[in-house]
Structures are given as C-alpha cells and as structure tokens.
Amino acid sequence: MASRPVFLPNYQGETLVEERSFDFHWASGFAEVQKKKNIVSLHHKAMTSGIRRVLEISSKSEEKLGQKLSAFSLKIEIDGNSYPLESVYQGSKVFEKTGPFPEIFNFSPREAKRFIRENGEARITSFRLEGIDYPLSPKNAFYDWLYIRSLAKHSDWINENVSYDAFTDIEFNPAKQINCQARAFAEYLSLISRNELQSAVSNFDYFASMLSPI
C-alpha cells in the first residue's frame, strides 16, 4: 500500500490548494506500465471519494495535456530567452560553496539535474535568478513561482482546454520530496479564479505570502 496526495484548486478561503491523500495498492517497479497502474489506482480512489475528474501532470500521464503541463515540458522566459523550466530551477540554486549556474539554463532537464548532483557543494542556501536572491522558505515557493510564471501567458488556452477538478503527480512522494507540479498547477488555477495571477507572477513575496508553510 502507498499514500499519495491529490491537489484541488481552492477558489475561496485562506489557502490556494486543498490537499487530500489516499491509500491505494502500489505496483512496485520502475517500468512505465507500473507507474501508469499506480496512476489509475490513485485516480480510482479519488473518484470513489467524489473527485470525478482527475488529471495526472507528469511525463507518465496518459493525457497529452498532462504531459504538456509537466515541468520537464514547460519553458520559461528569462531575459528574453526561453529555457526549460526545470533547468532554470536547477541552475538558480545557490550552495554554500558554489552556484548559481545560469550556464545550465539551456541544458535539458535531465542534464541540468545531473550537473547539480555533480557540482552542488554542501547545502543549498538560496536561489538566485536575474540578479535577485530568493529564500528557501516557504520550501516550495520558488519552484511553484517559476512554474506559474511559465504558464502566465497561456491562461486563455488553459481556460479553454482544462476542465479537471483535481491533479496528481505519481512521482511525487511528500515524505521524500518538496516540489510538486500538480500542486503548482492547482495553485495556478486558484490564482486565475481569484484574479491574482498577474500580482503573483510579478511579485514573488506576494505569491509566497499566499502559501501555507511546508
């Protein structure tokens, strides 16, 4: 058995996202077919609890939309250039002895992650992007902010094409990880509904103030 979260946009109230966790039978193994079995199992448990339309947001999603919304597929504009979102996140890390690494912004996401594993020294102290330092707290704030920035110009398309109630990322294990693209997308939808998207995109501190501490 395993427990994984499902994220629902919270269009009113103090938090941007409602997180509900479900226990389900976990198909072990690294094969893609096993991961897709786990997606089906998690979505089935969510639907039996009244959450009808659930979209997996990851490269393992059965839906093209879910694959397109994966952080590994999205691009973000930095200083007039377009880079892979994940690579910008990795390259913005500042360690005690090294970083940031803007030279890896144009790496593929997998190459960027490998580079950081090999070159990051000691602990992460902050993020630095476009000459500005960003804090580590809330822990998910910088990653989520980059994700939301990458989608800001596509809100009209998303309004026309996204009709789901909740979102998952089967690779995300809250016991071991902090960042989750499914949660970030649910936050994005909440910001649109509240007419807060542009304010959040243009002001990191304002966006961070809307997040619950993790």
Image (cartoon, rainbow, N blue to C red):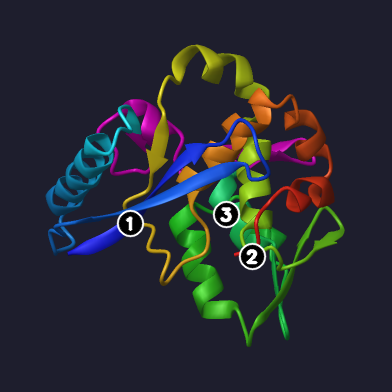
Q: Residue at x 68, y 60 (%)?
A: 103
Q: Earlier in the sequence, mark 1 or mark 2?
A: 1
* Cα distance between the residues tagged 3 and 2: 18 Å
Residue 84 to residue 192: above or below: below
Label 3: which residue? Answer: 87
Q: Helix, strand, or loop for circle 2? A: loop
Q: Nearer the viewer, residue 107 or 99?
A: 99
Q: Helix, strand, or loop for circle 1? A: strand
Q: Amino acid at mark 1?
A: Arg
Residue 73 location (% of width, % of height)? 46, 39
User: Left or right: 159 with respect to 41?
Assistant: right
- Within-10-Å neighbours for mark 3: few <14, some 14–19, many 20+: many
* Cα distance between the residues tagged 3 and 1: 26 Å
- Within-10-Å neighbours for mark 2: few <14, some 14–19, many 20+: some
Residue 136 location (% of width, % of height)? 71, 68
User: Left or right: 140 with respect to 197?
Assistant: left
Q: Residue at x 45, y 21 (%)?
A: 162
Residue 190 tag number: none
Question: Can residue 76 be seen here?
Answer: no
Looking at the rendered image, the disc whose residue lies closer to the viewer, 3 or 2, is 2
Residue 139 tag number: 2
Q: Amino acid at mark 2?
A: Lys
Question: Can residue 48 be seen here?
Answer: yes
Label 1: which residue? Answer: 4
Residue 176 location (% of width, % of height)? 42, 72
Q: Earlier in the sequence, mark 3 or mark 2?
A: 3
User: Left or right: 61 with respect to 178?
Assistant: left
Placement of the C terminus among the 4 image quadrants: bottom right
| Residues shaded magenta | 55-83
Q: Amino acid at mark 3?
A: Ser
